[in-house]
Image (tube, rainbow, N blue to C red):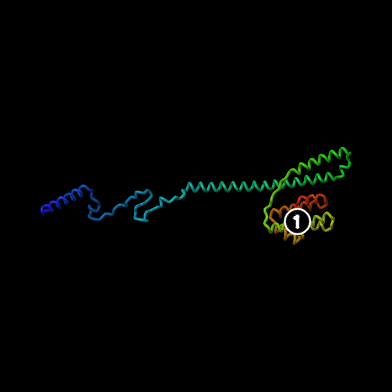
Amino acid sequence: MSEHGVRQGEDDGDFLLNVLRSESPPSPGDVDGTTASQPPRSSPIPGLSATGYGNCYDTRGLVDTPSPSNQNQVSTLDDFLLTTLDEMESRTEKLRETVKDAVEERTKLLGSLDTLMRSEALGRHSDDERQELEIYMDRLIVRLLTIDISVQIVRSIPQEQSLQTVRTFLVKLRDCISNGVPDAETTIQRYLNSCMEEAKGPIDDRFQGALLGCAAEDQKEIRKKLGAISEAREDTERQMSVFNSMDLE
């Protein structure tokens, strides 16, 4: 190519550059002669700020954090569940107490019927009347025996062993009462004092030690039974009825 042709090409290139410059708007730096900073580039991904490269992008918009409304919903749900469970626990304990009362009522009725059948009052009636009364009582006993309800107490092995020891003490007490041993009433009171948080009299250390090793429900039931035995101190039949209602064997 000739020298004239080279110059002509350079002139054409300069001409095109000048045209492009004249069509583009001047930057602030071109006006006052200073270098203007470029605005930050926008990221093509929503939630990302293209302020850098590689791992320098702002990823806060992509983290799935619970909103305040969601947190309130979770808190409300937790409160509802806890309240519901508390109510169910209360109803469960009431049901257990109701069943215990039913078991005790069944035992009392059976004991009363047994006492009536051995009562001298039957001898005051004629043979026909006495036979009719006995048939009536037998029918009630059969109906009561069809009621089979119980409340199980969860016990650990040491608690089972302690309960068995307490039962041994109570069996000996029952035998003493049945045989008319004079010290039986004193033993009842000592055992009952051993069940109290604040004893009102002398206690039995061995009985109390075994009792404290029992489950809380067993302790409460034993204290209740001993109270009933103490109240019936002048009625041996009632006392035996209370012992019979206890699982001592």
Considering the numbered disc 1 on the image, is that residue within a helix, a strand or a loop? helix
> Residue 164 at x, y = what percent?
73, 57
Between residues 43 and 137, which one lies in front from this camera angle? 137
Residue at 73% across / 43% down in the picture? 147
Residue located at (30% from left, 52% from top): 39
Q: Is residue 43 left or right of residue 195?
A: left
The 10 Å Cα crowd at callout 1, few under 14, some 14 to 19, many 20 or more, is: many
Q: Position of residue 139 (x, y in %)?
A: 79, 40
Does 138 appear above or below 192? above
Please tell me which residue is depicted at 81% across the width and 44% down the height of the picture: 113
Looking at the image, which residue is at 52% across and 48% down?
A: 75
Q: Give, as a three-letter code, the residue at label 1.
A: Arg
Q: What residue is shown with label 1?
A: 167
Please state the total of marks drawn on the protein image. 1
The vertical placement of 197 against 72, above or below, is: below
Task: Find the residue positioned furthest to the bottom.
Answer: 205
Q: Quadrant of residue 189?
A: bottom right
Please state if 172 lies on the left or on the right of 149 as rendered. right
Front-most of residues 144 and 76: 144
Residue 247 falls left or right of residue 78: right
Quadrant location, the C terminus = bottom right
Residue 248 in the image: state x and y as whole percent: 76, 54
Q: Nearer the viewer, residue 49 or 123?
A: 123
Residue 64 horizontal/vertical position (percent)? 44, 50
